[in-house]
Image (cartoon, helix red, strand yellow):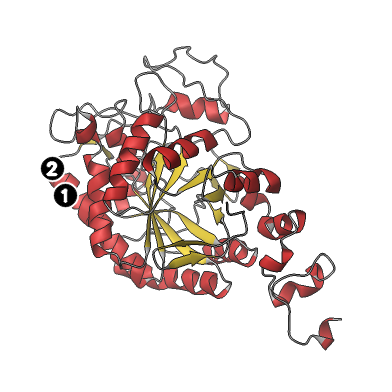
Amino acid sequence: MPNLFDTLTLRGVTVRNRIGLSPMVQLSATDGYASDWHLVHLGARAAGGAGLVLTEATAVEARGRICINDLGIWKDDHIAGLRKLTDFIRAEGAVPGIQLGHGGRKAGYAPSFDREGIRPLVHLTESQGGWPVIGASPIPFDDDSPVPVEMTQQDIDDVLDAYARAAIRADAAGFDWIEVHAAHGYLPHCFYSPLSNRREDSYGGSFDNRIRFAREIAVRLRKVMPDDKVLSFRLSHTDWIDGGWTTEDTVALATRLKQDGVDIIDVSSGGSTAKTVALMRQMRHEKAGQQHGRDDPVAEIPLGPGYQVPGAEAVRRGAGIPVAAVGMITEAKQANDIVEQGRADMIMLGRELLRNPNWPQLAAIELGQTKRIRIPVQYYLGWKDLGEFAYKPVSAPLLD
């Protein structure tokens, strides 16, 4: 079996190791445009040794922004700023990837942090620049959220077109890996989860109807993407609630997405109800199953190291498709064991890479894999005594 520092090749893309930066919201864009912060944030993780560097959820249309300061790719003018990101990421040896997102009923929030600190999540009013949110059904995310407008067939067609145009722009911007954010209660998840989809047309009711929207996104993207570029889907493998989406459902969806041209599933979980989010963030202290607000039960999530790995493993084995594991994976040996044991093909790190962009390089030291990790020559002095790394200056008399 491969280990954490073996390469991974999907289609025409080879990732130098099995470590990826998970999409992490930065709230640092204005009108969707990439900023200097995005270059520093993503560039540091590429220089730090990650094999795959994914952007945050990047909105395929303006009304799809989860927060108003999210990255965007809904117009051609966004391409130039994104190209600066991909050029730098690629120059540092990593694969540049983009996550395409649409918030659906969970769109339209004000920034949750700024220079003054952290703020509670609140929806923008129209006078504040907000917009009506859309969803599979007119079911609000929580008691404080607006009721989404149920999407018509024309709305669905328009959003599918937006995804396709975004993929074309992503290719023009130099991204080699496109991931669709179809988890955490955002628009595609809103369709496939029975908790948020009460439609009675061809997009609701049966399992095949509820997954239709996700599959149509995959087909549209694969049609416009170059054959040698990777298409990934992030899925919530379970809603963690009785009567909701299950791991078995995810295996079935992943099997169909594989047929539609998807190359890898990024396996996460939850996000369909505010009660799930509340418990995960420990913002409230209700016991699992207690009711509050609307009649939605609190999801019981078994938080702990690698708690989502069993879901990734189930999808890998059941659907026969490569998977990425994510969620409370923090230690080098833990990550390496997941790959070596065949439980996942990649490890996506979020908070851990926020804390330490050099996590891959330090993991290489711990696992005795320093010859397989690159250190930027500019940082040679800081690393030269820690191991024999793969990249060192040919001659560095001024650095000794």
Against 178, residue 101 (above or below) is above
Looking at the image, do the residues carrying marks 2 and 1 touch, with CB atoms under 8 Å apart? yes
Q: Residue 216: x, y in percent?
A: 22, 48
Give residue 138's mark: none
Secondary structure state at the residue bearing disc 2: helix
Q: Residue 34 vs residue 388: left or right?
A: left
Instruction: Provide the residue designation for mark 1.
Output: 157
Regarding residue 357, the answer to whether it shows in the image is: no
- Give the quarter of the image for residue 130: top left
Query: Of all residues shown, which one is farthest toward the front?
Result: 1
In the rendered image, the vertical position of residue 308 relative to residue 44, given as above or below? above
Residue 161 is situated, as x and y percent measured from the top left of the image, at 21, 56
Question: Residue at point 52% right, 16% down?
Answer: 288
Q: Amino acid at mark 1?
A: Asp
Around disc 2, counting alpha carbons within 10 Å, would you say few (fewer than 14), some (14 to 19), or many (20 or more)? few
Dot 1 falls on a residue whose secondary structure is helix
Q: Position of residue 190 (x, y in %)?
A: 31, 35
Identify residue type, mark 2: Gln
- Per the rendering, the mark at residue 153 is 2
Quarter of the figure with the C terminus: bottom right
In the visual, does 122 lie left or right of 91? left
